[in-house]
Amino acid sequence: MAAPSLSAALTSLSSLTLSTPSRFSLLPTPSNKHSLCLAKPSLLSSLKAKPQDDIDTSFFDNVNPRDDIPFVPPEIPEGFVPPPSFDDGPPETEDEIAAAYEELYGPAYSGVSVLGNDIYVMDSKTKRDTGFGSGVKKEKLRDGFEERVVQVRRVTKVVKGGKQLRFRAVVVVGDKKGQVGVGVGKAKEVIAAVQKSAINARRNIIKVPMTKYSTFPHRSDGDYGAAKVMLRPASPGTGVIAGGSVRIVLEMAGVENALGKQIGSNNALNNARATIVAVQKMRQFREVAEERGIPMEELWNCRRCESSIIREGVPLPSIKEPRWASMCS
């Protein structure tokens, strides 16, 4: 009697499953941890995702997805006017084409910017595509500016692993019509250093005031660091009497008659920048007349009287005395 009861108990235990709680289980956890529960198929079926009733799927009941379904375009609504074709529109003007080209590729070195951009700043995309290491040979810029190398020096930078050898180039660019700029650049190769310095020089273009005799309107002095430069106007036929980087800057600016002198340091870069500083101090006679609010004739007469008084040996502070001031009236 005991054997049948034992076999019946083992059979009932084999149909039971031991439920272990899990933190990621979707089934409800029983309250008693040591209780045994049967796997109910009704509970699993209730957990399955039910299709939404608001989606109409009756179209797929009578359609075989393997068959070729012809496309039927929707009907055109009433009052629809098709847009004009691209070829039917008015032709674009040259200004519109140039503005669109400049908006896509940036300002060009043509001297004219349709969108008002700076034409002397090279686009970053152009530098990335044609710079050092790109494998593309860079063409010479045709923007009306000429380049002249003033100096190329080897410079070293001491780092933890030793010394890094590079080249520093000083370049002067100008159009020989009154515009000039000085730039400096460093690179691992000489050609790349010259290209970088030329770009830097184009970013620092200045206007040089000149008279009709291609000389300065007045004398001026400039200094940069320990370098000092003295510039003086000269009569027609004198030429540019200067040396070093001062001569190069004046020639690239278009000055034909001038005197220049380097005082102090012989550094080429500092002397070139000192020349730029001296040129920036110069002003035309019409600018001074507008600031004083007097006509050009009166300014010339006062200047002529001051020159004659100075030639007579009268010191400058005494020029404003009544007896000398009457000569300028």
Image (tube, rainbow, N blue to C red):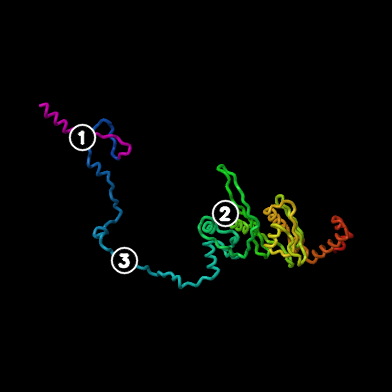
Q: Secondary structure at mark 1?
A: loop
Q: Which residue is mark 3?
A: 72
100 versus 26 height, above or below: below
Estimate the x, y position of residue 227 in percent, counting from the top left: 72, 52
Is 272 left, or right, of 84 in this rendering?
right
Question: Which sits in the foreground, 220 or 80?
Answer: 220
Using the numbered discs, state the Cα–Cα distance from disc 3 to disc 1 in whole angstroms: 59 Å
Is 9 colored magenta in this rendering? yes
Q: Which residue is mark 1?
A: 16
Q: Are marks 3 and 1 in contact (CB under 8 Å)?
A: no
Q: Residue at x 45, y 70 (%)?
A: 86
The quarter of the picture where residue 272 lies is: bottom right
Sequence-wise, which precedes: disc 3 or disc 1?
Answer: 1
Is 57 left, or right, of 161 in this rendering?
left
Estimate the x, y position of residue 159 in percent, counting from the top left: 57, 43
The quarter of the picture where residue 252 lies is: bottom right
Residue 286 in sight: no
Report the span colored magenta: 1-25
Q: Residue at x 29, y 56 (%)?
A: 56
Estimate the x, y position of residue 296 in percent, counting from the top left: 77, 66
Is 69 colored magenta in this rendering? no
Mark identifier at residue 235: none
